[in-house]
Image: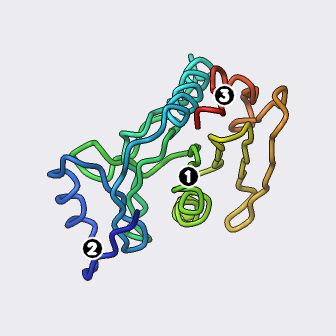
Amino acid sequence: MAEVLDKIWQAEEFLAFERASEQKHELILGELYTMSGASFNHNRIAKNVLVLLENLFQNTQFEAFGSDLRLANLLDKSFCYPDITVIAGEPQFLDKEFDTITNPVFIAEVLSEGTQNYDKEKKFDIYKELDSLQEYLILWQDKMKARLFRKIEKNHWEIWDFEEKHDKIPILKQFEVVLADIYRKVDFSKG
């Protein structure tokens, strides 16, 4: 998955490369990752979450986006495409291209066998450095399971696991989603 290159990428250099590329890449702590296609279950879970959040966020300051919105963490010179990104209020863009944000309050990632450690460790290390981020939700695609990380203060996060279909996952301290709704129509036998 990783293409570790013999060069150190500068933010402007990576963005120029990425904006000209037909394929998406993530830059995580100096390692360039080529983004591959996702499974049907992965896409269904991400779509379900996006629809649930959009319905919850009507008439609020929150807005949810899918995996085409790039996120920047300039402290670590990292750029990612989370499966779901939520912002509160106005987006803060990296530059005048308006395609890279810096102020997510909530991020969700759907895990797969190939990206599980990458999403749970490397990407979370990048995400938790963002001052604006309040919560990070990871979702398994091979079983009904969710893990929510909620920031208590810098470098102090609570972790909650959800595995029962009627479990209610608190989102941004004012919303709830039911685990079964996230996994609606997901057939685990089809991976």
Quarter of the picture containing the N terminus is bottom left
User: Considering depth in this image, is 50 or 91 the residue closer to the camera?
Assistant: 50
Name the secondary structure under disc 1: loop
Image x and y of residue 33, in percent: 36, 62
Q: Residue at x 25, y 80 (%)?
A: 7
| Mark closest to the chain's N terminus, 3 or 2 | 2
Q: Amino acid at mark 3?
A: Ile
| Mark closest to the chain's N terminus, 1 or 3 | 1
Q: Give the left or right position of residue 74, taking residue 120 as reference.
A: left
Q: Residue at x 76, y 26 (%)?
A: 178
Near mark 3 (Cα within 10 A), the count class, few <14, some 14-19 or many ≥20, is: many
Q: Are marks 3 and 2 in contact (CB under 8 Å)?
A: no
Name the secondary structure under disc 3: helix
| Mark closest to the chain's N terminus, 2 or 1 | 2
Foreground disc of the pair 3, 2? 3
Question: Mark 3 sits on what residue?
Answer: 182
Image coloring type: rainbow
**Is residue 24 positioned above or below 128 on the image?**
above
Image x and y of residue 160, in percent: 81, 49
Question: Mark 1 sits on what residue?
Answer: 132
Q: Amino acid at mark 1?
A: Ser
Q: Give the left or right position of residue 53, taking residue 71 as reference.
A: right
Image x and y of residue 107, in percent: 56, 45
Distance CA(mark 2)–CA(mark 1): 25 Å
**Is residue 63 positioned above or below 11 on the image?**
above
Question: Mark 2 sits on what residue?
Answer: 9
Distance CA(mark 3)–CA(mark 2): 37 Å
Which dot marks residue 156? none
Q: Residue at x 39, y 67 (%)?
A: 2
